[in-house]
Each structure stands twice: as C-alpha cells, then as structure tokens.
Image (cartoon, coloured by chain):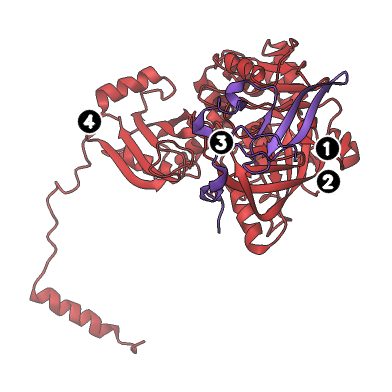
Amino acid sequence: MNDLAKRAREITSLRDFLALLEEAGQAITWSERVMPEPDVRNVAVAASRDANGAPAIVFENIAGYPGKRTVVGVHGSWDNIALLLGRPKGTTIRELFFEIAGRWGDADAQISYVPEAQAPIHECRVESGINLYDILPVYRINEYDGGFFLGKASVASRDPEDPDDFGKQNVGIYRLQLQGPDSFTLMTIPSHDMGRQIMAAERTGLPLRIAVMLGNHPGLAVFAATPIGYEESEYAYASAMMGAPIRLTKSGNGIDILADSEIVIEAEMQLGERVLEGPFGEFPGSYSGVRKAPIFKVTAVSHRRDPIFENIYIGRGWTEHDTLIGLHTSAPIYAQLRQNFPEVTAVNALYQHGLTGIISVKNRMAGFAKTVALRALSTPHGIMYLKNLIMVDADVDPFDLNQVMWALSTRTRADDIIVLPNMPAVPIDPSAVVPGKGHRLIIDATSYLRPDPIGEAHLVSPPIGPEIDELSKKIRSMQGGTSA
Amino acid sequence: MSGTICPRCSSSDAVSDCQGMEDGTVIWTIYRCVVCCFSWRDSEPPSAIGLGVRSAAFAVDAANLDHYPKILQQ
C-alpha cells in the first residue's frame, strides 16, 4: 500500500481530511473578513469553476460569528476526491470510477463503538436555550432560497417500525431549512428512505427521532448520498468502501452517529405538521418550488470544541454537489447492471445526479443496448433519476465527451431512440410534464449489428396425421390411474 | 410581534431570531416571517431582501397559502 492509500485509510474525521488536503494544497484558509451573504457564496462559486482542482475553503473570519468556522468545497474537486480515495492529484475521472467500482463488495465493514463519554462529538452539549442560528455560521446558499439551509447534513434515523434493526437505520443527505432557533424542515420524497420512514411514523403514530450530523468523516458524506438498498447500512457500506474502520457512538436520543463528527443536532418530528419550505436552488440548477414539509423540533445539540460547520454550494453546475455524488451515483448503477449484464463496461452518471447517463456496453446482439438501458431504468437510482440515457459501444469511453459525441454523430440513427412517456421523475426536474412525472429518452448510439438469424432457418416439420393422433390416444389410455 | 415587514410576502409579522454580535455591537439580525416562513439577515443585499426590490417571481401570496402542495401525503 502506498503512502497516499495509507493516509486515506487513516482518516477518521473531517479534521484529519482537512489536514491531508492542506498538505496537498487542496485546502486553504480564508482569513479575510467576509459577510455571510453574499461573500461565502461568491467565494464558493468562484472556487467551483475548477472542477478538477478546486480546494476546500475554511472561512475563519465571518462577520457576526466571531471565533466560528465554516468550510465549503471539501468534496469540491476531483483532486479532493482522489485524495480521499488514496490516489494522487491528477487521477482521471475514469480511473477514479474504476477505483470505486473495484471496491464494490470487496471488503467487510469494520465498525467500532466508542462510549458516549469518550466520543469527541459529545465534548460540548447544549440541551436548553438552543439557537441554531447562533451555533451554526449559516449563510443563504442561493439568493432566492427561502431561508438558511444546511445542504450537507447526513441525517441518521431508525425505522420507526423496526427501531432495533441496524441495517434499516438510514443515513442520508437531505436538505434542511432552519425554521426558528430550534426547528427545521426536512425535504425528501416518498422513494427515499427518509420519506418512507416519515410516512411510516405518521401512519402508525410512532415517534421519529433523528440525528443530524454536520462536518463528518468525508467517506460518509460521500456514501450517505449513494443509492443503496433500504436494508443496507450506510455506515457498513462506507466502512467497506473506504477499507477503513468507522467509529460510532450513540446520540442522546439513541441513534448511532459518527463519534468524530463536528456537530450533531438531535430532533424529533412533529407528526402530521407541515410548514412552508423553499425555494432552494437545487442540483438541476433551478429553484425548487415552495412546498409544505415536515418539521422537526430540536431536543439537543452536541459538538466538538471549536467545531467546524461544513456546508456546500449547490446550484447551477458545476458545483461541489456534482463531485460529491457523481461517481457514487455511477458506481452502484454499474455494479447493479453487471449482475445481469457483464457486457456493461462503464457508467457515467455524473450529470445532475444522473438526469443524463452514458453507458458503454458490448452489444451482444441487435438491440441489446436498449435492453440494458431498460434495466438501468429499474435500478434503485434509475427509477427516479435516469432521464436521458445514451448507450455507446465498449470502444467508446463514456467519461470522454468527445468520444460520446463521435458515437452520437456516427452511430445514431434518428429513429433508433425510445421515448417512454409519463414515467416517474424527480419533482425538481424543471423539464417534467408535471412535478414527479416526465418522459424518459434512450438514445442507442451503438453501432449497427445484424439480428440473430432466428426465423431465417428451415423449419422442422414434425410428423402429423391419423397415425400420430392414434398414438396420442394410446398414450393417454396407458396412463390409467384415477381422475384427481 | 416586532412589526418587521417580510420582504417576500409583505406580512408584518416577522420575529427576530438571532443577532450577530462583535464586541457588544450588533452586526446583523436574522428575522423570520411567521406567515410565509421566509427568513433573512438584515445585512443581505437589497436584491435578496429589499421590499419591492426582490424579484416578484419569488414572492409568496400570504392570502393564498393553501395552494402550496404538502409533501409525503399518505
């Protein structure tokens, strides 16, 4: 194992990763005084122009927040993702994809528990007089957002109907809008694990308690956004994919949380209540609408001493959101497709969380690429997100858009597309017919292949006629037995 | 109620949630409208929080809150 890989496996917290990034010139400290708005947004947007090499930026002089720190862009470039994966700066996106794909199902989870009293996350605890606006140096992420959002929070929760099942415990990234000093809304959709748990709690009247983790192990921030099965643990998955142990502890409200996160907010959903949420500048590059979302009441906050508040800039791409989840959107689709179709050679679903995906495949027979495309639409992520699929041959690198354009130019026939109308769609897709319902497009840009010669061969002529009819009767009469 | 007017829905029912302090001086105040749930910091540029300056496309009609969809209905 080389030094970079060893360092990556030794990361246990955001602080460890920031130190590694700083050594590599991939994290900078912004000491100049900034206003929360619009300065933090402006700096973050300027940095994200460089998708390959942007550094994380730690703001340490924010007007009105003396002594508090905010970091953006921790996962804001491919170089930062490379260092997280133990690879050098300059590693290509294709190499990073295969680094992740190669780890899939390759290792066991290593999870250890730290007693609460020894867990750094519980160094400081606030149980009364909670004011999130004071604890967190928040800023308006996009100009017309409806309020102050936490855009990079990993939310842990237990299944309200099966609270003891570790695997059904969910960890996911959901956007949270502060709704007062000790309240926030959470936005999700029914197909997401959190949406499922909220609906179950409201159907049964069971309480739903959550722990919102901020400033986390950078591996979890990546894998909490990865679409894996409902009964798979994101903690176990993150540990296995990182090839490194994950340290957990308990939150004050009984949920497994990372022991080394910066801040955790413990909260309980107010069953049946909804308040106005949004708009929010989302990953398609457009604002979500205003909707009524579930509201949570904060019961306690734990944090490390001198905590670092981690947030994100998200909006019209390219942004940190795209590098944070791009490869980990692509890799599960690749793995799930290859279970049925080993002919799939790579999946690029980097664009707007997979609203457009490019899949390379060895065409087994005429039309085979379309079959693969239809299977992709039924993967957990594909059900809602894979809107436009471009199928290319295995000799085309889906991560090289020049090659993809070549395939579109030379191997696509205008009638060799499929449009699937009125399919499920992510509600925030601005091109949807109505929010939540839209069309899917499959472009077969693979080269022409002859059909299998079925139907062209000479037909077998089985014997027929009175003699065969008599033989059939004789067989039935020989069977005997009683009628059932 | 403070009587502060919400730049999004023009209601006059905004409350003050937090003040940013430096050496005893108030640097900014965060307000929240209890009608349309908009929240803002009074140090933000007028394009975001200026009454009559903000883009009308992002206004909320306080008299018509019922038409906003409720997510996760059974």
Q: Is residue A115 visible?
A: no
Q: Amino acid at mark 2?
A: Gly
Residue under disc 4 on the same chain as residue under disc 1: yes
Q: Which residue is mark 2?
A: A252
Residue under disc 2 on the same chain as residue under disc 1: yes
Mark 1 lies on a secondary structure that is strand
Tell me which label, 2 or 4, sits earlier in the chain. 2
Asked if the residue under mark 1 is in contact with the one under mark 2, i.e. CB atoms within 8 Å, the reply is yes
Q: Measure the C-alpha gap from mark 2 to mark 1.
A: 9 Å
Task: Decide: few, some or many residues near mark 4? Use Cα within 10 Å; few <14, some 14-19, many ≥20.
Answer: some
Q: Amino acid at mark 4?
A: Arg
Q: Nearer the viewer, residue A173 or A480?
A: A173
Q: Amino acid at mark 1?
A: Ser
Q: Which residue is mark 1?
A: A302
Visual hue assigned to chain A: red
In percent of width and height, residue A375 lies at 40, 44
In percent of width and height, residue A136 lies at 76, 30
Q: Which residue is mark 4?
A: A413
